Image (cartoon, rainbow, N blue to C red):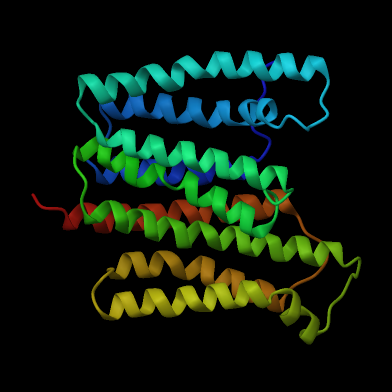
């Protein structure tokens, strides 16, 4: 049996930044298609690779076989397109992204061994790796490093961090076993959520005021900021995670569209 990632929300964090970077970097061509195959295969190979690497994990021999089979199925589709991009299309900068990804894998493995990979910090770290698809896809399209790569990474980093912090607040509320919360309890449970989104609002407002980001990018952040802060004051134990996931995905798509439009029209002709 082929093993696939269980965290469905990670697909959006992987693919939406990828599409942003690809579109802003010039659109879809054979290079982007090859890179997409490689990115998806690396993503799919991660879970079985993690299972094989966690030596102290007590898994059955059948699961070990499934993990090894899955890893060997996905590995060629991860490596071969990357080699074509690097050596045929001369996109040597992908070696840097690959090195960062390899280091991130070992760090994620270390966090997993300490049982920290499912914590808020561990999930934020994993997210920070996934959103690298934005600058890397942009690089594949444009063929060089520039400031836009850093801007895309930073914007995606703080945006997708929002969803993780918000969901962690919901999980904390669920763990209390209480059905209703007082205002002080809501503020205590959601203290990190409020702090994170107030900080984003201040930061994006400052960047907009100094013309570092445009109006569309600024507006792209507002729905998720408002929703997350209001969610603290309306906090209750009952959580529909599937519905919440779809809401976060819609916000992500709106954000991506606004950023794509703004960056695309401001690129040099």
- Residue 30 in view in this figure: no
Horizontal relation, residue 196 to residue 253: left or right: right
Q: Which residue is at a point 28% across and 54% down the rendered structure image? A: 261
- Front residue of this view, candidates 240 and 129: 129
Check the image and report above or below for 54 versus 172.
above
Horizontal relation, residue 192 to residue 82: left or right: right
- Front residue of this view, candidates 169 and 223: 169
> How many numbered discs sit on the rendered protein?
0
Give residue 198's position: percent from left, percent from top.
52, 79
Give residue 79's position: percent from left, percent from top.
41, 20
Q: Which residue is at a point 52% across and 53% down the rendered structure image? A: 250
Give residue 221's position: percent from left, percent from top.
44, 67
Check the image and report above or below for 216 versus 75.
below
Q: Which quadrant would residue 10 be assigned to in this image?
A: top right
- Front residue of this view, candidates 47 and 218: 47
- Which residue occupies the extreme left position in the image? 269
Q: Which residue is at a point 26% across and 41% down the rendered structure image? A: 139
- Front residue of this view, candidates 35 and 263: 35
- Residue 226 in view in this figure: yes
State the quadrant of the N terminus.
top right
Q: Which residue is at a point 48% across and 46% down the rendered structure image? A: 129
Give residue 61's position: percent from left, percent from top.
81, 15
């Amino acid at each position: 049996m082929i093993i696939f990632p269980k965290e469905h929300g990670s697909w959006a964090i992987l693919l939406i930044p990828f599409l942003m970077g690809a579109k802003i970097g010039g659109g879809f061509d054979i290079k982007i298609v090859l890179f997409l195959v490689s990115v998806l295969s690396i993503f799919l190979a991660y879970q079985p690779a993690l299972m094989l690497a966690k030596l102290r994990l007590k898994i059955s021999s059948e699961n070990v076989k499934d993990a090894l089979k899955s890893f060997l199925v996905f590995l060629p589709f991860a490596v071969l397109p990357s080699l074509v991009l690097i050596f045929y299309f001369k996109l040597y900068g992908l070696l840097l992204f690959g090195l960062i990804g390899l280091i991130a894998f070992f760090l994620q493995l270390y966090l997993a061994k300490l049982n920290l990979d499912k914590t808020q910090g561990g999930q934020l770290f994993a997210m920070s790796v996934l959103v690298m698809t934005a600058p890397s896809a942009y690089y594949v399209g444009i063929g060089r490093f520039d400031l836009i790569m850093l801007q895309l990474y930073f914007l995606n980093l703080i945006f997708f961090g929002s969803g993780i912090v918000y969901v962690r607040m919901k999980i904390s509320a669920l763990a209390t076993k209480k059905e209703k919360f007082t205002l002080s309890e809501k503020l205590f449970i959601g203290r990190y959520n409020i702090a994170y989104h107030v900080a984003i609002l201040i930061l994006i407002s400052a960047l907009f005021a100094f013309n570092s980001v445009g109006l569309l990018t600024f507006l792209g952040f507002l729905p998720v900021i408002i929703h997350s802060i209001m969610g603290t004051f309306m906090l209750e134990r009952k959580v529909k995670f599937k519905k919440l996931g779809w809401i976060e995905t819609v916000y992500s798509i709106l954000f991506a569209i606004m950023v794509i439009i703004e960056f695309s029209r401001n690129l040099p002709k």
